[in-house]
Image (cartoon, coloured by chain):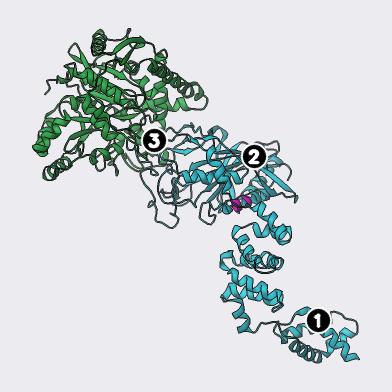
Chain colours: A cyan, B green
Amino acid sequence: MDDVIIGLEIHVQLNRLRSKMFCGCSTSYHDAPPNTHTCPVCLGLPGSLPVINRRAVEFGIKVALALNCSIAEETMFYRKNYYYPDLPKGFQISQYDYPLATGGYVLIKGDDGQERRIRITRVHMEEDPGRLVHAGTIDKARYTLVDYNRCGMPLLEVVTEPDLRSPKEARQFLDKLRTILEYLDVFDGNLEGSLRVDSNISLAGGDRVEVKNISSHKGVEKALSYEITRQRNLKRRGIEVVQETRHYDELRGVTVSIRTKEEAHDYRYFPEMDLVPLRIADWVPRIRAELPELPDAKRERFREQYGITDDHAKSLTSDIKVADFYEWVAARADPKLAAVWIADVLKGELNYRDLTIESFKRESMLEIVRMLSEKEITDEIAVTLIRTILDRGGSPREIVESMGLKRADDDYVVRAVREAVADSQEAVRDYLSGNARAINYIVGQVMKRTKGRADPSVAHKLVKEEIERQIC
Amino acid sequence: MLLQLKDEISSGSAEDYLHRLFERIERSRLNAFTTLAKESALEMAREFDARHWGGALAGIPIAIKDNICTKGIETTCSSRILKGFIPPYDAHVIERLRAEGAIIIGKTNMDEFAMGTSTETSCFGPTRNPWDLERVPGGSSGGSAAAVAANEAPCALGSDTGGSVRCPASFCGTVGLKPTYGLVSRYGLIAYANSLEQIGPITKTVEDAALLLDVIAGHDPRDSTSVASEKNYLSSIGGEIRGIRIGVPEEYFGEGVDPGVERAVWDAVSVLDDLGASWRKISLPHTKYALPAYYIIAMSEASSNLARFDGLRYGLRVGEDRDWHTTFSEIRAMGFGKETKRRILLGTYALSAGYYGKYYLKALKVRTLIKRDFEHALKEVDIIASPTMPFPAFRIGERITDPLSLYMSDVFTVPINLAGIPAISVPCGFSDGLPVGLQLMARPFDEALLLRVASAYEQSTPYHLRSPEVV
């Protein structure tokens, strides 16, 4: 896919802020009835004036620093003029010249497995419009309702250079961005509409097509793949790709044209004189000093400090909550063992159940890792414990006691081995006649008799010894 | 006068005073008001008579220009498109007035969205000049000035984007003050051109203007462009003006200026001279570029500020609802008057891709030059004196069909808004029986000196004591 060129514009809702971008309205409207989180300012009532939420700008600078951008000495807001019912002032307060930050980058793993540097063009701030609810589809609705709760939510727009080479890389980039945002505690990606993506795609030599309305980081891969296929098909049929804006229909998984180059908007950007330019250069040292450890740095440290593999370190740091979870356990038990069990087993079991790390107590994980390193339980039992806790709750110790899952003592296993060998003479004969795999059947019998509490490798060894003892 | 009235009302009856006032307003042929808040005002007056609350404006009735939001009182900007809009909140200045005990008697007529110099573009019809009912009261705060001049309100608030307080003050023979940009919070003032406008008092005397400014000035966290004030304007007047240096800009006289106006202003300069101030001619060389720069900036901002009026959430709703674009286009077509549409179109054009640099950016550069003119001049003089308007009030209908000649009449007022400095218009005589205004300008935030000089002049002349014989 060497000919694919993708650039992204990502709108991030800074929903960890308490109040909106230009007024005091609360940002926690997600479960509220429509039009209950509004005031004269975010409703754009005549005579109302915006006031910059300082905290929002600080959050913006935080993100820009984490994306390795240079922060502007002075930043200012502009009006972006267009008519739409979700925009109660008839313009959106955004940025144009003098954005918050420019020129950064994010490292991702490219399709070739190599680390790739995706350049960030700029980061700027703006206000979210309201939300339209169409009675039916966008083109056939009988009426449309407007909810202004979202109106005025602080948005950060992150614009990349056209450095991405495949839908998968775009997905990688968004995953990484989301991780960084969550590390910074400025963003909760689980809230609806918290991350929205517009994308520019072209095939080498062809015109650029903008795809709007991609509302999830999962949707981006699908939308881009569709669009690339569409452009390739056109190319194959000798039809030129035209510069246009297309809308991604998530339900149908297709993109549809909404306007051509000729119909492009003229937003008549000009300075928002109700807001004064902000000198932010002086804010940067303090904000930089308060930046938390970011994913790349943490991954590096995990590898060094805990001696774990890079794959494990990457997996454990891809979510700040998992990283904190791991560090807590690693400080109290074997860090390597903890890495394996959290990165390979726990995360898989959580994924399978569509759960997050909050569903599992770190104390339970610590107990399991400790029991494993003390050889009190087998790997199989540990898996059973994790599954049981996720499905039914309880603590590892309780489950071990109540279900009698403790690793069997040697006498018990030896007895089980003797019985199993005695009851499986046919398999013994097979084994002795050269079928090495027959021994697995007998080991299985031992596990059955011990209800899984025997260590399979120990059982294997004992079965072999018992058979040899029989021949003598 | 307001201080006297305050004593009078306190010792007498606010209710009786208001009854007389409303009677006068209802008999009037001026059409100065768009909405009367009779019930709420009388109720407040009765309450005042019972409880006698304190405050700088305790019991004082005041009229408010119809582009300043008043909670519970319809606020229309004299536009059809805002008919029925009852703000759910008070503008900052209204909160301040209420806190100091003033009683709001109603909303005054204006040019639609403050776009005009004559109060003829109002959807309520023109307001008449109390000195000659066939003439305009000036604009855009024509209703406020006419009401004060004709004793239909003891004081009023207007707004001044390019002269909208000073022009009607000049035409109606009242005092009108445009404060420094940022001195008075614009929160609740329905924007026409937000980088230029300020709310200002229209009163009978300079002292009254100072009293009102003390109440409405000051920092408001809801307006990022507002700053803190010292709040001592009332006490700053009455002092000597000996040694004050007055500058008279040569660009503000000559061609197009009515001889009667010119004479009255020169007389005023010699009065100031008699009071011990010195004067000299100065130059504000970029004055001739002010008018086009002003109109480009004002119209550009207006095209964006007025975009919110789509009939969706408040105001005019016409015909049957159809799709979004058809419906809001119809509402705007029906709701806005001709002049408002003209300015929205011109502003939209000036901001369009390809023209932005040619018009808007260039106008901003001119604005900087104008500002610098004043900075230089106000290093050498303390106060600048000029006519407020080049001529006295013109006839209703005389200029409205020729927008350019109407725009030209703002030539001495708009530079002040571009520079953001304070200016006041005080009555300085008559030309053919019509009032003439003297415009005084000062350094940014030096309202104290401006008011002191204006008051010293006013107290040595009889013009503010004359009232029109109306009705």
From this view, report whether residue A459 is shown above or below residue B161.
below
Quarter holding the C terminus of chain B is: top left
From this view, report whether residue B454 is shown above or below residue B223.
above
Q: Residue B58, image x and y in percent?
A: 18, 38
As rendered, which of A81 and B13 lies closer to the eye? Answer: B13
Q: Is residue B320 left or right of residue A321?
A: left
Quarter holding the N terminus of chain B is: top left
Q: What range is drawn magenta here?
A: A176-180
Residue drawn 57% across and 34% down? A261
Secondary structure beneath dot 3 equals: helix
Q: Are marks 2 and 3 on the same chain?
A: no
Q: CA distance from mark 2 to mark 1?
A: 58 Å
Q: CA distance from mark 2 to mark 3?
A: 38 Å
Residue drawn 24% across and 29% down? B234
Membership of B409 in magenta stretch: no
**Count of numbered circles in the view:** 3
Q: Pinpoint the chain carrying mark 1.
A: A
Q: Residue B265, image x and y in percent?
A: 26, 12
Q: Residue A205, image x and y in percent?
A: 70, 36
Q: CA distance from mark 1 to mark 3?
A: 84 Å
Q: Main secondary structure of the magenta part?
A: helix
Which label sits on residue A460?
1
Q: Residues within 10 Å of mark 2 (few under 14, many from 20)?
A: some
The residue under label 3 is B329
Q: Residue A471, image x and y in percent?
A: 90, 90
Q: Quadrant of residue B76?
A: top left
Which label sits on residue A161?
2
- N-terminal-most mark, 2 or 1: 2
